[in-house]
Image (cartoon, rainbow, N blue to C red):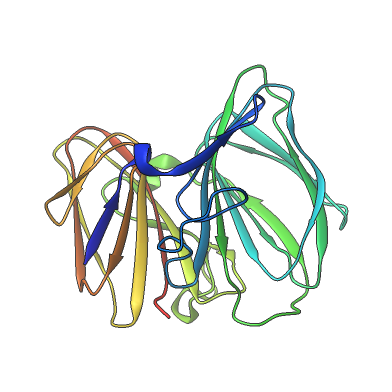
Amino acid sequence: MIDIRPHATLGGADHGWLKARHHFSFAGYHDPARMNWGRLRVWNDDEIAAGTGFDPHPHRDMEIVTYVREGAITHRDSLGNTGRTEAGDVQIMSAGTGIVHSEYNLEPGTTRIFQIWIMPEKRGAKPSWGARSFPKESREAGFSVLASGRPGDAGGEALPLQADAAVLAATLKAGQTLRQTLAPGRAAYLVPARGAVTVNGRPLGERDGAAIADESEIAVTATEDAELVLVEVAAD
């Protein structure tokens, strides 16, 4: 089953400094049919104006992944972490027992991000933060695991998640196809950060979402050059 969710149908808000689209219910947007996809709870498509951002605010018991599509985001938190994450790279924050953080666009132009929230396996974990660069060349024609809490990915280069889930990315040239298996009991959510593809023959445009379940294999073909982000989670 593949449910295509065009970007134009997503919830959203325009705060001037922040233009947001919500793939799932969030803040003032509520759709009972789009509360989550398995353990995936939030996928926000945010555009943050230069010199603005999210002032310090708290989180707890959530895995928060930020994938930067354009520009850069600067993070600071109550654990003393600070870092700047650039386009194509990823940062994760395990909120655990509680953390306060800020995220600012200190760049001269607009920063565009996907912010993804995944429900952890258990509450009360130790909070943490990390970021890493992933050269896009390593993702051509295949998904690279950026962050993971899946047992099979332990010990790899992926940033750790406190959840049985994985965040993957790939770049494809027009005409290229990649295939990704999906085990029973698993679900996936796929969004092109740029470009357009077909997913098992279904067209998916830039920043559209594809909610995928009960498919043993996902065949993704680029109809134009594309950059893809995929989250794979437990379906329950």
Residue 89 percent location from the top left of the image: 54, 43
Q: Which of the 4 quarters of the picture holds residue 2?
A: bottom left
Q: Position of residue 235 (x, y in %)?
A: 39, 77
Q: Is residue 22 visible?
A: yes
Q: Classify 4 as above or below 37.
A: above
Task: Answer left or right for 38 relative to 174.
Answer: right
Task: Determine the residue positioned at 65% across, 30% down.
Answer: 15
User: Which quarter of the image is occupied by the C terminus?
Assistant: bottom left
Of 217 and 141, the residue lying toward us: 217
Q: Quadrant of residue 76?
A: top right
Residue drawn at x 26%, y 58% is 3
Residue 101 locus on image (x, y percent): 80, 50
Identify the residue at image location x=26%, y=52%.
4
Which residue is the extreme one toward the top?
Answer: 108
Question: Could you tell me which quadrant the N terminus lies in?
Answer: bottom left
Residue 193 in sight: no
Q: Nearer the viewer, residue 85 or 155?
A: 85
Q: Position of residue 137 (x, y in %)?
A: 38, 41
Q: Is residue 107 above or below residue 91?
A: above
Number of disc labels: 0
Instruction: Return the residue nearer the eye: 39 or 7.
Output: 7
